[in-house]
């Protein structure tokens, strides 16, 4: 997937360069230097992109502390669980595995997440309100803390981080995919 993004950005840079070549001949003196600077900056952005925060697929099994991200396993210190007929995930661990930055504000019991795509999510323990990019969303259950980990319903995690969710009932596995990244 990282290779796909890099190839796509490189192809875009090449296409813009080729399309604009005939326009160079008709430009006034000095314009070429400005356009050349633009392409240097664009190439720098393509070369400096951090693809390590992106993933294609993440799998978690209810009751298991094993998390698989693109086939590579990690051991978590908290496992997903089912509570009141809702699949609940330890949001901080899952969000970080998805490339997000997570901050905890103890004075207000508020979690703030900035996803790899730049979205901002915040919610407070004991409140069913969640804010995604300044838009309020109501959850049907409230986040809670268990063994120093904050749990949220999977649909809220997926909605907040723009992920697709599949439930594999036979193995009680949750599969999260990031369609905007692949």
Image (cartoon, helix red, strand yellow):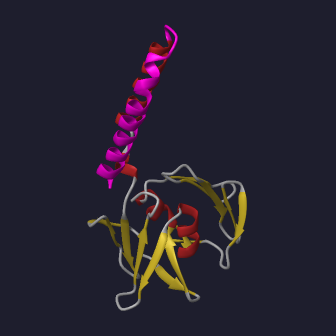
Quarter assignment of residue 181:
bottom left
The furthest residue to the top: 29
In this view of the protein, which residue sits in the foreground, 175 or 91? 175
The furthest residue to the bottom: 170
Span highlighted in magenta in the image:
1-30
Q: Is residue 28 above or below residue 79?
A: above
x, y percentage for residue 64? 36, 78
Does the segment drawn in magenta span residue 21?
A: yes
- Principal secondary structure, stretch drawn in magenta: helix
The furthest residue to the left: 72
What is the number of callouts on the image? 0
x, y percentage for residue 12? 40, 40
Q: Residue at x 48, y 53 (%)?
A: 100
Task: Tell me if 115 is positioned left or right of 21 in this view.
Answer: right
Q: Dividing the image into 4 quarters, which one contains the N terminus?
A: bottom left
Q: Dividing the image into 4 quarters, which one contains the C terminus?
A: bottom left
x, y percentage for residue 66? 32, 72
Q: Is residue 166 above or below residue 25?
A: below
Q: Residue at x 39, y 36 (%)?
A: 13
Does the segment drawn in magenta span residue 155?
A: no
Task: Tell me, yes or no, if residue 148 can be seen here.
Answer: no
């Amino acid at each position: 997937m990282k290779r796909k993004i890099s190839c796509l950005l490189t192809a875009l840079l090449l296409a813009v360069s080729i399309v604009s070549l005939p326009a160079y001949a008709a430009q006034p003196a000095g314009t070429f230097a400005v356009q050349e600077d633009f392409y240097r900056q664009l190439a720098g952005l393509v070369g400096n992109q951090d693809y390590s925060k992106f993933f294609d697929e993440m799998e978690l099994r209810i009751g298991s502390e094993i998390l698989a991200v693109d086939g590579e396993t990690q051991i978590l210190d908290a496992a997903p669980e089912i509570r009141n007929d809702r699949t609940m995930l330890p949001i901080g661990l899952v969000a970080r595995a998805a490339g997000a930055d997570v901050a905890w504000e103890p004075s207000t019991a508020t979690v703030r997440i900035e996803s790899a795509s730049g979205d901002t999510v915040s919610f407070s323990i004991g409140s069913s309100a969640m804010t995604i990019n300044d838009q309020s969303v109501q959850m049907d259950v409230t986040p809670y803390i268990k063994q120093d980990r904050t749990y949220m319903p999977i649909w809220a995690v997926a909605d907040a981080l723009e992920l697709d969710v599949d439930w594999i009932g036979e193995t009680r596995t949750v599969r999260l995919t990031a369609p905007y990244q692949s």
